[in-house]
Image (cartoon, grey):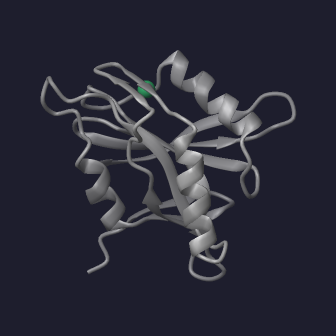
């Protein structure tokens, strides 16, 4: 059964998030009070037919990250893991965005998140001009799309699922 999460992005095409990835991200939901904020990068591949992009891999928290109940600092180790995955996949699996968790049922981004996303859009290397940002909440996962623009990046909520 294909239990992937599909989001039709107007003018762009179909974004698919694999069911397996959703299950893996759910393991980091901050459901108990002791569970710390987690995060990492999203990895996917662009599709020639039947869609635009599938997001199906991620990096879990790394040793040099800093994790708190309401804090997550992503270290450079994630970039190294992405590079290894990219090489191993013959340059098909590539960096497409970021994910992190929030200790709230329906997550919304903080000003720090927005700054991080804008910095990422402006400074990191990726294919095209778009990145995707997931926040894994206690009840919903939400997906924002960031588009790099000359003057002001655009960040918009494009979908959410109950998990
Ligand atoms: Zn956040």
Res 52 seen here:
no
**Residue that protrudes farthest toward the left in the picture:** 32
Quadrant in which the N terminus appears: bottom left
Which quadrant of the view contains residue 14?
A: bottom right
Residue at 28% over, 20% down: 69
Tell whether 144 sits left or right of 163: right
Res 10 seen here:
yes
Residue at 22% over, 48% down: 27
Indicate whether 155 appears above or below 5.
above
Indicate whether 133 appears above or below 12.
above
Which one is in front, 37 or 90? Answer: 90
Q: Position of residue 121 (x, y in %)?
A: 70, 38
Which one is in front, 158 or 76? Answer: 76
**Residue that protrudes farthest toward the right in the picture:** 150
Tell whether 20 sits left or right of 7: left
Residue at 75% over, 50% down: 129
Which one is in front, 81 or 6? Answer: 81
Q: Quadrant of ligand 1?
A: top left
Q: Position of residue 46 (x, y in %)?
A: 63, 70
Indicate whether 15 appears above or below 119.
below
Which quadrant of the view contains residue 45?
A: bottom right
**Residue that protrudes farthest toward the front in the picture:** 63
Tell whether 135 sits left or right of 158: left
Q: Position of residue 40 (x, y in %)?
A: 46, 43
Which one is in front, 161 or 76? Answer: 76
Total tally of numbered discs in the picture: 0
Residue at 30% over, 35% down: 137
Which quadrant of the view contains residue 103?
A: top left
């Amino acid at each position: 059964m294909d239990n992937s999460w599909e989001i039709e992005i107007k003018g762009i095409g179909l974004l698919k998030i694999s069911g397996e990835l959703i299950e893996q991200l759910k393991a980091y939901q901050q459901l108990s009070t002791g569970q710390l904020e987690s995060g990492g990068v999203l990895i996917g591949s662009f599709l020639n037919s039947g869609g635009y992009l599938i997001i199906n891999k991620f990096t879990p928290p790394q040793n040099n990250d800093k994790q708190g109940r309401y804090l997550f600092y992503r270290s450079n180790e994630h970039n190294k893991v992405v590079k290894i995955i990219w090489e191993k996949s013959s340059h098909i699996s590539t960096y497409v965005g970021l994910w992190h968790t929030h200790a709230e049922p329906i997550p919304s981004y903080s000003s720090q998140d927005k700054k991080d996303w804008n910095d990422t859009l402006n400074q990191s290397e990726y294919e095209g001009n778009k990145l995707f940002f997931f926040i894994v909440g206690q009840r919903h996962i939400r997906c924002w799309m960031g588009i790099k623009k000359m003057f002001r990046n655009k960040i918009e909520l494009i979908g959410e699922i109950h998990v």
